[in-house]
Amino acid sequence: MGNALAIHIHDLHKTYIVSEREGGVRAALASLVHRKKQEVRAVDGISFDLAPGEIVGFLGPNGAGKTTTLKMLSGLLHPTSGELSVLGFVPWKRDHDYLRQITLVMGQRNQLVWDIPAVDSFELNRAVYRVPAADFRKALDELTQLLDLGPLLKKPVRNLSLGERMKCEVAAALLHRPQVVFLDEPTIGLDVTMQRRIRAFIAEYNRRHGATVLLTSHYMADVVALTRRVIVIHHGKLLFDGDLSALVERFTAHKTIVVTLGDCTADLSAYGEVVSCTDGDVTLRVPKAETARVTGRLLADYPVLDLTVEDPPIEEVIDRVFQQEIP
Amino acid sequence: MRGIADIYAQQFKVTLASFIQYRAALVIWLIGHVLEPLIYLVVWSTVSRSTGGSVGGFTAADFAAYFIVLMIVNHLTYTWIMYEYEYRVRQGTLSPELLRPVHPIHSDIADNITSKLITLPGMLAIAALMSLIFRPAFHPVPWAAAAFVPVVLLAFIVRFLVEWTLALAAFWTTRVSALNQMYFMAMLFFSGQIAPLELLPHPVRVIAFVLPFRWTVGFPTELLLGRLTPGQVLAGMGMQFAWLAVGLVLMRFVWRAGLKVYSAVGA
Amino acid sequence: MRYLRLFLVFFRVGVLGELSYRSNFVMHLIESIMELGTALAGLAVVFSYTSTLGGWRPAEILALVGVYFLVSGAIRMVIQPSMERLIEGVHEGTLDFTLTKPEDAQLLVSIQRVEIWNITDVVLGSGVLAVALVRLGANVGVSEAAGFAAALAAGGIIVYSFWLMLATLAFWFVRVENMLMIFSSMYEAGRWPVGFYPRWLRFMLTFLIPVAFATTVPAQALAGRLSVSTLAGAYALAAVLAVLSRAFWRVGVRRYSSASS
């Protein structure tokens, strides 16, 4: 059934030409005669491949090019140059057979019809995607169970809370059992509990149906919970593509040691950078190579109640990745 | 007094700014104002041609004159406040206005007058153009032209009061568009916009005499065209004053009642 | 066939959506009756002075009023709401959802919203039309009825294509909703035979804002005064506009796909 690869991207570029204009009357008049054009490289030569069934997190700050890449993959945007194929199709040709096998979920943007119960919007999708009645029933039952949709289905969408609406949006997007699922910031704006629910659902769905999932986010928690493989993008360029743990490994020169001493009177600055001390828990940052040595000395010099060695928080790692901009 | 003058000056600037922003919407809206009298002008001219040149004392040229003047008078007196009030009440934008020491009606009057000052030149140009095309027959009567000024002013005030009071229905119901529609249908018919009132059957004319609609649009038009005797004009002005009084009383009463409802719900 | 099925699904959803707003139905009904009442009253006054108007008999003008309301209702039921939603979708980005569906996007955006309560205009218009037909009596035969259906179909295509082209402007301009109003404003003139109006207005109402083909031409068919050349012209225009509007739509979508982010 198609290629060995679900998604194949090679040297993909997307460049926009934007007309620039400064403020003020002078500039406005000048722009009537001559428009200054500026080239914006939203996606600047990225390449990666996804095998069927992979869940991949596509991480990057706002404006990094994540959404642009996703739109090119779902056929919404024409690339400026490069190779791009999903399930063996060229996305921007918008072949109906292709569109039937993918789905797009966008955080904070609804495809559900506002005034009617969600289940009626589902019916619309069923008709558009030509889902046979039996398959539709099965999919709906499964999604209702996994997402706990029971009481929500009959309520008009406008009466649902933000989180409930998102659950219904996700369900609507999956009724036709797409092989490739594109999620663009699906948890944005949701409360923590709901974020976890959605993440758990995506993981379960991927496990059950082997759908390839490409998820963009600027929340680390999304990526940590769901994916092992992370692709980091910034200024349109790929900064990293690989295991999350490898990311941490490569980009951290430090480790964090948390020592429980009982109080905060001791001055540990000789051992490493003291980040904080709360209730007797001292947090130290030490160069990776020094970890064993510092640990040993701390244990020898102080009545340590507890000691843990941790990687720095992932957010910090990612921030450093973005700032460094070198793989 | 100072406060009121400020409001008017302020509103002038605000209205001007929004005009520049919503040019396209404005043009399209004005099309309706021109098209409707034009349609009836054409229809009645066609009728007069089918009946040998005139209908009830109106020739095609008379009809042209009537409807062109009607268009201008309608433009001078019309309001759109009933559409806005529903929005204001629903969105709660009314509340800040209530905190001002000046009655909210003033900013609405200011907005209305400003809009008309801006659009009147255009309308007059269109009227001139229509005169070239349809060749209306004007029989100017000097004293009538002089009387026109106070009459049309009165007409504007009466119409504004009535329609502003109607707009307050928004305090009680969200179903204002049905109500507005009923008002407009009555207005169309009894103000002489569908046909000069002279041409309507007698019972209708009687009703039209009593209702305010004729005195806001039809009456000034008939006056300017010189179709009224001095006696009729005086009677008409009397009706205008009567409706002015009624309008003021009604407006005050409904406003107070409406405020009670509004603040009960939560301003 | 498939398109019809899809339309029915959207129609059903539209109906369901509005059913919870039952009071809207009463509102619409009152408004429609008011509007119709005024139209009929105007008609009554006019025909109290003459027995024919510009060659049209009262029953024929009545038929025109019926067609006017019927077509107005149809436009306000499907075409107008869907085009308004299209403009929103372009500006809010929800058009993306439509473009990732495995169905022709133009079809989807054209039937996406149904405001069912405007069916009151359709029903009232049909009622008036029926009364007019009775009055016209034996003068309406098979060929008139066929001509009417054909003219109405052509008029429908023309009106739809026009609205689509206006809405497609949303890919380039921001405040296009106001432009949609231009049709509604000019449509008023459709209550009387377009032939009454001076030539310049007739031209505008025929070729610029296609009111004539929506109202006068079908009514002419019922009155037995529709020439074959006019009907042929209507179909020619319908074909041209259908092709043009689709081409324009595709240009708009291409622009949306390449220039937006």
Image (cartoon, rainbow, N blue to C red):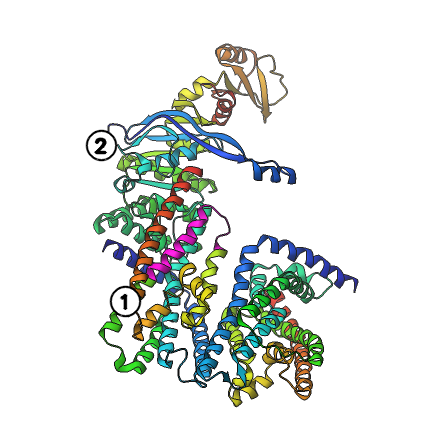
Q: In this view, does C177 lie above or below C45?
A: above
Q: Distance between the residues labelled 1 and 2?
A: 56 Å
- Which residue in the rendered view is the most extreme toward the right? B2
Amino acid under label 2? Gly
Principal SS element in the magenta part? helix
Could you tell me which residue is drawn at 62 percent across and 71 percent down?
B77
C141 relative position to A313: left or right: left
Q: Is residue C129 left or right of residue A323?
A: left
Which residue occupies the extreme bottom position in the image? B202
The x, y position of residue C139, in whole percent, is 27, 80
Q: Which class describes the residues within 10 Å of circle 2: few (<14), some (14-19), or many (20+)?
A: few
Q: What type is the residue that disc 1 sits on?
A: Val
- Can you see residue A168? no
Q: Horizontally, is A55 left or right of A251 in the view?
A: left
> What is the span of residues highlighted in magenta in the rendered image?
C156-177
Location of mark 1 (residue)? C228
**Whole-percent x, y for residue B264 in the image:** 61, 67
Q: Quadrant of the N terminus of chain C?
A: bottom left
Q: Mark 2 points at which residue?
A: A2
Q: In which quarter of the image is residue B7?
A: bottom right
